[in-house]
Image: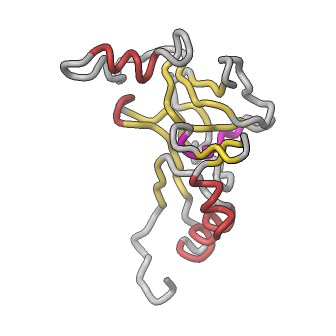
Amino acid sequence: VAAHDRSSLRAFGSTGEPWTTDAWWWLFDVAGDGTRPIVNLSGGTEVGACLLSVNLLAGCVPCSVGGPALGVAVDVVDDDGRSVRGTGRVGELVVDAPWPGMTRGVWGDPQRYLDTYWSRFAGRWWHGDFAEVDDDGRWFLHGRSDDTLNVAGKRIGPAEIESAVL
């Protein structure tokens, strides 16, 4: 990395992937010389923008996706739809209220949109990611909740396997 000209590099962008601490620090310290922020966010095609994003004025926290984007009502809930925000527990990332940028349906199949995103938690839009909010209000992604293996009754996602291997 040091052999390449990075003088025009101002920041790094990352969208929707869980980070390992080692990978985050490598990008920040080695590729970014400890001076270039990592703008980590979570969103999706269906929402037309980001749900969670780092606020550069507040500073970057390793592996965090910051917090809710302006005007977006998001939460982390358990399997019964109860908020686990601020408990340090991992749950499902949901949107509590729609906003103008959200998709209104699937072309030619409106019921599919309702079944996929609005039926899992009554009145809430389901994103499909595991997330966590620590007691300092920092948000973290833990991979796709719809991409898991059930091993001896424990749900394991690809991000956990990747983290263990690395």
Of residues 36 and 137, the one nearer the viewer is 137
User: Which residue corresponds to the image point at 44% horizontal and 22% vertical from the top-left?
Assistant: 117
**Residue at left offset 61%, top offset 36%:** 67
Measuring 38% from the left and 15% from the top, which residue is drawn there? 114
Q: Quadrant of the C terminus?
A: bottom right
Q: Give 101 or 75, whichever is nearer the viewer.
A: 75
Q: Which residues are magenta?
A: 138-144
Q: Main secondary structure of the magenta part?
A: strand
Q: Position of residue 28 (x, y in %)?
A: 60, 67
Residue 130, image x, y percentages: 61, 38
Q: Where residue 21 sits in the image (x, y, percent)?
A: 68, 62
Looking at the image, residue 133 sits to the left or right of residue 31; the answer is: right
* Residue 140 drawn in magenta: yes
The spot of residue 13 in percent (x, y) is 46, 55
Kindly give the residue lying farthest to the front in the view shown.
Answer: 152
**115 to the left or right of 24:** left
Q: Is residue 31 above or below residue 93?
A: below
Between 100 and 22, the one nearer to me in the picture: 22
Q: Reply above or below: 142 against 70.
A: below
Residue found 56% across the figure and 25% down from its top = 94
Residue 134 is inside the magenta segment: no
**Outermost top residue:** 123
90 on left or right of 32: right
